[in-house]
Amino acid sequence: MSSSPRSWRRAGTALRGWRSRQWTVAGAGALATAVLVGAPTDVVPNPLFGRSVPVQWWNYPALAVTAVLTGIVLTTYVRRPSSAPEPHAADGGRLGAIGGVLSFFAVGCPVCNKLVLVLLGASGALSYWAPLQPLLAVLSAGLLAEAALRRLSSETACPVRPSA
C-alpha cells in the first residue's frame, strides 16, 4: 500500500494542480458512476429496474463515496500537458477496476444477484450475503481510495530519464 505521508502530500499536490478540465471530468465521471451503479441496483430509483429488498441506509453513502473516488481515478487518465508525467498503468488501475465492481455487488439487492441465489438460495442471500455487503462497500472504497492515491501521487513524481 502507498499510504505513506509522502504519497498523501503528492496526491494533495496533484489535486491542487488540477485545472477546470480535470474537475469537470471528475464530476462527469462521478455522475456517470452514480447512474451506472445506482440505476441497475435501484439505489437511484428508476422505472427500468427494481429490487426485492428495500435499499439500506448505508447504500446511499456507499454509492456517493464510490462515485466520487471513481471520478477521481477516471480523471487521472485524462491527458495532461506534456510537462506532467503520466502515471504508469500499474499505479492503481486494477485496484480501481476491482473496487468499482465490488461496489456494484455491495449496494445491489442481495436476492437479485443470480450468482448468490444459485450458491446460497434466497434465505442464504439474506442471512449470509446481505450482512457481508457493508464490508464489501468498505473494501470497495478502500481499493478505490488506494487506486486514487497511487495514481495521483505518481502524477507529481519526478520522472526518471535514461542517461545518454
Image: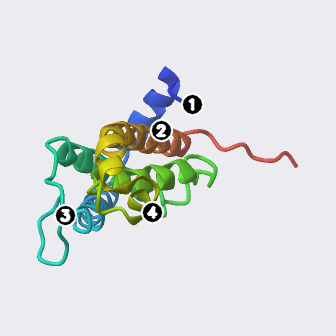
Label for residue 146?
Answer: 2
The amino acid type of the residue labelled 1 equals: Met
Label pair 4/3, CB-CB below 8 angstroms:
no
Q: Tag 3's secondary structure?
A: loop
Specify whether residue 16 is in view: no
Residue 101 percent across, percent down from the top left = 43, 57
Determine which residue is flagged by label 4. 78
Q: Tag 4's secondary structure?
A: loop
Alpha carbons under labels 1 and 2: distance apart = 7 Å
Residue 132 percent across, percent down from the top left = 36, 39
Label for residue 51?
Answer: 3
Q: Residue at x 51, y 38 (%)?
A: 153
Determine which residue is flagged by label 1. 1
Q: Tag 1's secondary structure?
A: loop
Alpha carbons under labels 4 and 2: distance apart = 18 Å
The amino acid type of the residue labelled 4 equals: Val
Ranked by sequence position, the earlier of labels 2 and 3 is 3
Whether residue 36 is situated above or below residue 83 in the rendered picture: below
Label for residue 105?
Answer: none
Q: Nearer the viewer, mark 1 or mark 4?
A: 1
* Along the line of sight, the residue nearer the viewer: 137 or 19: 137
Specify whether residue 160 is in view: yes
Q: Nearer the viewer, mark 4 or mark 2?
A: 2
* Along the line of sight, the residue nearer the viewer: 16 or 8: 8
Ranked by sequence position, the earlier of labels 1 and 2 is 1
Ranked by sequence position, the earlier of labels 1 and 4 is 1
The amino acid type of the residue labelled 2 equals: Glu
